[in-house]
Image (spheres, rainbow, N blue to C red):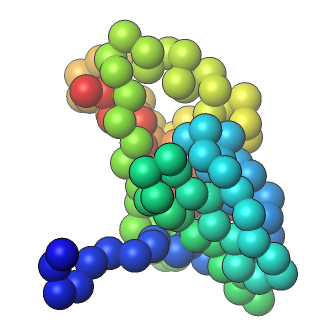
Amino acid sequence: MALIELGVVALDCPDPASLADFYADVLGWQAGGEDDWYEVVGPDGRKLAFQQVENYRPPRWPGQDVPQQLHLDFDVRTADIEEAERKVLGLGAKLVWHDEGKRDFRVYLDPVGHPFCLCMK
């Protein structure tokens, strides 16, 4: 075991339960928590957390007026990219960048404005 290991990545949001449910549905993981802190946990123990903040301001991707500060990349088999896109859009994501096959990723915003990518592998 390393001296220091990554424990969890936490995203600020106005409603942690709702955003945790979004990512739990995207990943097929389990969501849980209470009040101002929720987590989604994968079968291998990886975690993604969501914390409530007052006066939340979503990032304005791709500009820097309200910078993204981080984004999440999710790997998807190239053959499954269209199905994966339908899934995240159906869950409330918004497609904000796609260059018609010239690159191997697409950029979306989650329901509260955090950018994330579906990366073809």
Q: Is residue 113 above or below residue 81?
A: below
Note whether residue 59 is visible.
yes
- Residue 99 visible to the viewer: no
Along the viewing direction, whichever of 57 and 77 lies nearer the viewer: 77
The spot of residue 106 in percent (x, y) is: 40, 34
Residue 108 shown left or right of residue 36 in the figure: left
- Give the farthest residue toward the front: 1
Is residue 26 left or right of 19 when viewed as pictured?
left
Q: Nearer the viewer, residue 44 or 7?
A: 44
- Residue at horizontal 60%, vertical 46%? 29
Of all residues, the one furthest to the right in this rendering is: 35
Q: Position of residue 46 (x, y in %)?
A: 44, 59
Residue 56: quarter of image: bottom right
Q: Quadrant of the N terminus?
A: bottom left
Residue appearing at x 63%, y 67% in the figure: 39
The extreme left residue here reads 2
Rendering quarter of residue 121: top left
Which residue is depicted at the point 61% across and 38% down? 28
